[in-house]
Image: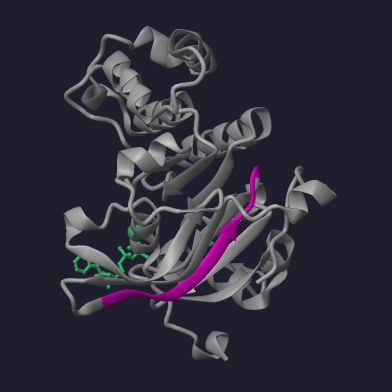
Amino acid sequence: MAISLVKTSTAAAESKPPLLEVRNIEVVYHDVVFAVKGVSLTVAAGQVVTLFGPNGAGKTSLVRAISRLLQSVEGEIRSGSVRFDGNALDALAPHQIARRGLYQIPEGGNVIKELTVRENLLLSQFCRDGSGSLNDDYARVVDRFPLLKTREAQLGGYLSGGEQQMLSMAKALLANPRLLVLDEPSLGLSPMLMQENFDALRELNRDFGIAILAIEQNARVALDIASYGYVMESGRVVYDGPAEQLRENREIQEFYLGLEGGLKKSFRDVKHYKRRKRWLS
Ligand SMILES: Nc1ncnc2c1ncn2[C@@H]1O[C@H](COP(=O)(O)OP(=O)(O)OP(=O)(O)O)[C@@H](O)[C@H]1O
Ligand SMILES: [Mg+2]
């Protein structure tokens, strides 16, 4: 599987192992439901990668496996490995993984509704590796998201969906990650908020060098900011390649980009399309 590096594509960067390396991961729920059936994937330092696929493809299960969040939902990694920055994550708890620089925003965001915006942000101190000043970084983050400054004392649950996504992103930034994993960050957002969300992601990548792995249903926007993409179906990666290649692929255009003979399809159709076995050949 080829890796395409973005701005870090120097000879030195190419000789380094990828920041995230997932190898042949299998995820099983309740000992019987095989949700992920041997998926491999890499993200290089500073790279933006997207992963998309229909409902039930195993995308969320895969990111739960990466961040070790399967236990609470009665799932387990049956085989395979996840390495971050060259180290196996097997023996680590989720908060220890976050401290190493791998931060996940789960589907629906990571806002604790009963806590204020400020309290939500300060929780990120437990995900930091101890370097840098929390106060300085706090100031920098609310400077980037000025709306949050005006809402510091408000409960997270009272923010709108878009504002909660913004707070999720701000919490992630304050955790000082090297890799941010997002599970459908634009779900339920209006097209304008979705675009803002992706602009913010692009900025986190460009200005802070944070690598991104974004699971997304809106492949069009995701392929716009990503340099590499994976398509997952029925627990397997069925297609992967540089973003330009995915954008030009006829079937991906048809099923994920809403183009078919020049006619647009709705995302409803795209999300529920019938599985195409020939991708597996
Ligand atoms: N806690 C669980 N217990 C049992 N089965 C589960 C559990 N979570 C997910 N599954 C099953 O695992 C498979 C993959 O689900 P997963 O949520 O990973 O898919 P997804 O690609 O994220 O889908 P979506 O696009 O709807 O979010 C599905 O068949 C699902 O029913
Ligand atoms: Mg999911």
Does the segment drawn in magenta span residue 276? no
Number of numbered discs visible in the structure rendering: 0
Q: Residue furthest right?
A: 11
Q: Tell me how the rendering is colored.
A: one colour
Q: Position of residue 99 (x, y in %)?
A: 41, 34
Vertical position of residue 277 compared to residue 96: above or below: below
The residue nearer to you, when weighing 195 against 51, is: 51
The residue nearer to you, when weighing 160 against 52, is: 52
Q: Position of residue 49 (x, y in %)?
A: 59, 54
Q: Position of residue 268 (x, y in %)?
A: 40, 64
Residue 256 shows in this picture: no
The residue located at (16%, 71%) in the rendering is 30
The residue located at (45%, 23%) in the rendering is 174
Which of the 4 image quarters holds residue 172? top left
Q: Main secondary structure of the magenta part?
A: strand
The residue located at (62%, 54%) in the rendering is 18
The residue nearer to you, when weighing 201 against 45, is: 45
Q: Indicate which quadrant contains ligand 2.
A: bottom left
Vertical position of residue 143 compared to residue 14: above or below: above
Left or right of 145? Residue 163 is left
Tell me the quarter of the image containing the N terminus. bottom right
Tell me the quarter of the image containing the C terminus. bottom right
Left or right of 3? Residue 63 is left
Which stretch is magenta? 34-46
